[in-house]
Amino acid sequence: MSADAPRAALDALRLVDHHVHGAMPGDVDGAAFEAGMSESSWAAPAGTTHLDSQLGFAVRRWCAPVLDLPPHVDAAAYLARRRELGAREVTRRLLLASGVGWFLVDTGYRAEQILGPAEMAAAAGARASEIVRLESVAEEVAASGVPAVEFADRFAWTLEERARHAVGLKSVIAYRYGLDFDPAPPSVAEVRRAAGRWLRRGEQEAGRMRLTDPVLLRHLLWVGVERGLPIQFHTGYGDPDLTLHRCDPSLMTEFLRRVQDRQVPVMLLHCYPYHRTAGYLAHAFSHVYLDVGLAVNYTGARSRAVVAESLEVAPFGKLLFSSDAWGPAELHHLGAVLWRGAMAGVLGEWVRSGEWSSADAVRVARMVGAGNAHRVYRLAESE
């Protein structure tokens, strides 16, 4: 086997995107498309667009050929071709070209605007499973008019029903509070008091049931732990709704210690710029895993450096591939294309230098791209 073997293996591999959202099925105009290419909620500076970025340049380099355009075509021509083909065809082409064989779809964020798991599978000629978001389930329960004294039982029952066919759970406590939360499970009395405060406040806000109470957020986590499925945590990079320094996964260390004996896999998502910290946690704790999804797309031509750093101290059985794509299907395609290219470049360099054998590089590529996700999420059992 040669230094080119990792590239060949990665090209042939049907990836498991272990954290992804649905693609947007409808036509996306210029402004909406541009907005989908940034985590910022603000307009780009005058005279520029959000496509003037590593991500925007990567779209024009790697997605343009899928739409029968030359690489690096200008943005106006790209958007015109997108309109000409129509959203359905653009989405079909980009999802198919991603080479993803299984999507694990987080359905808890603006699900009404995007494709669900079954629709993603059909569009991509792939398989798909659901990841259930804890906070979304709690907000659905609250909106149903549940009294505070019944909230905990109703949430547990609803989560059991919603997660019956899911392969994992997800928490956005990083957004709603921060990862510096009290790691201890709250008492029954604390949960009831907190539920009462939240439900009264929700009524006063005309049904806006967004959960930010730290006691209830902790309660959801511990109910999720009891469920036994892998739990995904947003960490690091994201939109301005979070406070970045409170999204450092090392802030969760005491929680990780408390759940270690439960052997519930804790999946640290995205992680950038704390991906080296996440790698340490995956090294130190038997139940911790990580990816660098989202960061791969947003670093574009520099994604190879991020992927290389993720391979520094984390055991290779603890790394997974994800795109964290939401909305324009370009993000789903790019997540796969950039990650394959970065892994092939890093592993190929190590083979050429004699640091790694070609056989080891191929084995690690297959582990991170698909094998680890199949094992941790027990995908064979979910078929």
Image: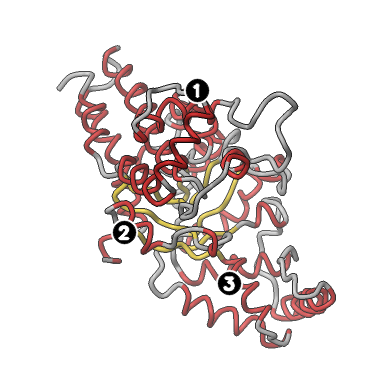
Q: Residues within 10 Å of mark 2 (few under 14, many from 20)?
A: few
Q: Which residue is mark 3?
A: 137
135 lies left or right of 299? right
Closer to the observer: label 2 or label 1?
2
For marks 2 and 1, the one nearer the N-term is: 2
Q: Is residue 57 above or below residue 35?
A: above
In the displayed orientation, state which residue is furthest to the front.
Answer: 84
The image position of residue 129, as x and y in percent, is 37, 62
Which quarter of the figure is the C terminus placed in?
bottom left
Q: Is mark 1 in CB contact (under 8 Å) with mark 3? A: no
Q: Secondary structure at mark 2?
A: helix
State which mark lies toward you, 3 or 2: 2
Indicate which disc, 3 or 2, sits on the residue closer to the N terminus.
Answer: 2
User: Which numbered disc covers residue 302?
Assistant: 1
The part of the image, by quadrant, that contains residue 221 is bottom right
Q: Quadrant of the N terminus?
A: top left
Q: Is residue 249 visible?
A: no
Residue flagged by tag 2: what amino acid is it?
Ala
Q: Is residue 205 visible?
A: yes
Residue at the right extreme? 204
Front in this rendered view, residue 27 or 341: 27
The residue located at (50%, 37%) in the rendering is 279
Distance between the alpha carbons at the discs numbered 3 and 2:
26 Å
Q: Amino acid at mark 3?
A: Val
Q: Which residue is mark 2?
A: 122
